[in-house]
């Protein structure tokens, strides 16, 4: 496959997944902002969202003080923000248009319709009327895109590069979500908490689990009260949890192996080593050494893996 075609397919999927994950992060912040809490605590949550997305400088240069309304506007409809939902869906559609002949009609029409529909929704005020429903719509369109892709595309290199983009982006975003939300919680994982704190923690962790469609899975796997260390274990180490780091890296490794050759085996080795580290890790060891440090290192390794994939398979960006 031509590297330019692979590049468009890879980034089409990454942008679609990024739009979904941005919607998930905004949704969990929006839901937790509805809980009883001080203005300062709520503001810390929105600041954390900007910092984990590495958007704080761009936001501050345009809006100044952090507010829920401005952060959501910046991350949903601001076309100058390359990581906003509208920008991601626009870029996904442009990449799809560039390789229209490689895609099935169903895949192209899904991408194109999503792009056209979000402009209509924003213009008509659907986002302002019900942010939660808007975020659900973004997530649904991403689900639809993946389902149509897997259900209609030939099982060849094109599909593997699309799936590779999806899983790599998901690993990056899940790590960022877990990092910012755990970092924001001030209470000790294992310390005693008041009844009020325990009630807040329940809704806090429930919102995080729901943001990655893991609340029902958590209940099925652990069958008891929600504990932070088990939330971390589910979202990091459980390979049977679809949006976990382990499951995402499993998808990366599998799809890389389908497109690799003798010249690109080093990239597969890097991906395999990162996946193996997740397979044999223990959550108590991760928490003992520091969750933030662990996730920061994981994000660095994922970024390095993305650079290797670009170097070996895709079109290199020019300065």
Image (cartoon, rainbow, N blue to C red):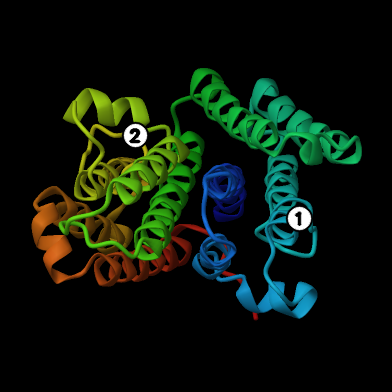
Q: CA–CA distance between discs 2 and 1?
A: 29 Å
Question: Secondary structure under badge 2?
Answer: loop
Q: Is residue 179 left or right of residue 316?
A: left
In the foreground, 144 or 293: 293
Q: Which residue is at a point 41% across and 57% down the rendered structure image?
A: 181
- Please state the horizontal and vertical placement of residue 230, each as a whole percent of the image: 20, 44
* Residue 242: assigned label: 2
Q: Is residue 276 left or right of residue 69?
A: left
- Quadrant of residue 259 within the rendered picture: top left
Q: Which residue is at a point 19% across and 26% down the rendered structure image?
A: 223
- Image quarter of the C terminus: bottom right
In the foreground, 86 or 169: 86
> Does residue 92 sit above or below 116 in this rendering?
below
* Residue 73: assigned label: 1
Q: Which residue is at a point 26% across and 26% down the rendered structure image?
A: 219
- Please state the horizontal and vertical placement of residue 282, each as a whole percent of the image: 9, 53
**Mark 2, mark 1: which one is toward the viewer?**
1
Question: Secondary structure under badge 1?
Answer: helix
- Please state the horizontal and vertical placement of residue 103, each as a whole percent of the image: 64, 31
Q: Which residue is at a point 57% across and 62% down the rendered structure image?
A: 315
Q: Residue furthest front?
A: 195
């Amino acid at each position: 496959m031509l590297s330019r075609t692979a590049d468009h397919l890879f980034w089409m999927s990454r942008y679609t997944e990024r739009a979904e994950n941005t919607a998930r992060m905004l949704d969990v912040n929006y839901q937790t902002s509805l809980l009883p809490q001080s203005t300062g605590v709520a503001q810390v949550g929105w600041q954390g969202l900007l910092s984990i997305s590495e958007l704080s400088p761009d936001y501050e240069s345009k809006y100044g003080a952090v507010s829920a309304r401005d952060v959501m506007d910046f991350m949903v409809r601001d076309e100058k923000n390359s990581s906003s939902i509208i920008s991601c869906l626009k870029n996904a559609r442009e990449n799809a248009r560039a390789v229209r002949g490689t895609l099935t009609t169903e895949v192209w029409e899904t991408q194109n319709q999503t792009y056209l529909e979000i402009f209509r929704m924003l213009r008509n005020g659907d986002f302002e009327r019900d942010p939660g429903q808007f975020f659900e719509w973004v997530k649904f369109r991403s689900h639809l895109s993946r389902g149509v892709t897997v259900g209609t595309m030939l099982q060849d290199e094109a599909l593997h590069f699309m799936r590779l983009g999806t899983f790599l982006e998901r690993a990056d975003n899940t790590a960022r979500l877990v990092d910012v939300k755990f970092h924001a919680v001030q209470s000790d994982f294992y310390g005693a908490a008041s009844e009020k704190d325990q009630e807040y923690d329940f809704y806090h962790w429930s919102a995080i689990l729901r943001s990655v469609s893991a609340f029902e899975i958590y209940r099925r796997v652990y069958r008891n009260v929600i504990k932070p260390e088990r939330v971390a274990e589910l979202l990091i180490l459980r390979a049977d949890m679809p949006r976990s780091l382990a499951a995402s890296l499993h998808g990366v490794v599998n799809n890389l192996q389908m497109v690799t050759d003798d010249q690109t085996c080093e990239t597969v080795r890097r991906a395999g080593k990162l996946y193996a580290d997740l397979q044999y890790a223990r959550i108590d060891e991760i928490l003992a050494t520091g969750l933030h440090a662990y996730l920061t290192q994981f994000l660095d390794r994922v970024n390095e893996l993305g650079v290797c994939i670009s170097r070996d398979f895709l079109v290199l960006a020019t300065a």
